[in-house]
Image (tube, rainbow, N blue to C red):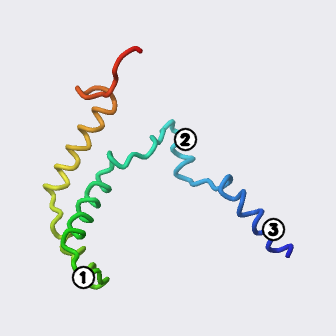
Amino acid sequence: MKKRLKRSLVASVKTRYIRYRIDGAAERTGCIQEPYHCEISQNERIWAQMKRGVAARNATFKLADLDVLLREEVAKVTAQHWANTVRHVMNIETKFRGDGEATGHTGEI
């Protein structure tokens, strides 16, 4: 009983004390990691494109068929797709910063 209690207590506070070297190095140099936004992640956008392609062509819902479909979708991703995605994400970042025309800022209330 004591062992279970100790494990549960340690598990409840363990995440407070986990530190990664890269986070410490970034903090010392003054780097700030922005909150994660999936709409400005190139990887997430390409992954979503591949998932849409698999979902559109998935008729059997069998794991073996999904593997084949996913490999085909991966093969469809070209350097041009990546370049377009990077360009698109850069435009979104510009709009988020407020440098673009569609900032969403309405002025004073």
The tag earlier along the polypeptide, 2 or 3, is: 3
| Contact (Cβ within 8 Å) of mark 3 with mark 1 | no
Give how far across and how far down residue 22 sits, in percent.
Answer: 52, 51
Of the 4 image quadrants, the one containing the C terminus is top left
Residue visible at 46% across and 42% down in the picture? 35
The tag earlier along the polypeptide, 3 or 1, is: 3
Q: CA distance from mark 2 to mark 3?
A: 32 Å
Q: Mark number for residue 60?
A: 1
Q: With 38 as the anchor, is 24 left or right in this view?
A: right
Element carrying mark 3:
helix
The tag earlier along the polypeptide, 2 or 1, is: 2
Front position among marks 2 and 3 = 3
Residue visible at 24% across and 69% down in the picture? 55
The residue beneath circle 2 is 27
Front position among marks 3 and 1 = 1
Q: With 18 as the anchor, is 58 left or right in this view?
A: left
Of the 4 image quadrants, the one containing the N terminus is bottom right
Residue visible at 57% across and 54% down in the picture? 20
Q: Mark number for residue 6?
A: 3
Q: With 40 as the anchor, is 58 left or right in this view?
A: left
Q: Amino acid at mark 3?
A: Lys
Relative to residue 93, is residue 7 depicted above or below? below
**Residue with the most extreme right position:** 2
Q: Amino acid at mark 1?
A: Thr
Element carrying mark 2:
helix
Q: Amino acid at mark 2?
A: Glu
Residue visible at 18% across and 63% down in the picture? 77
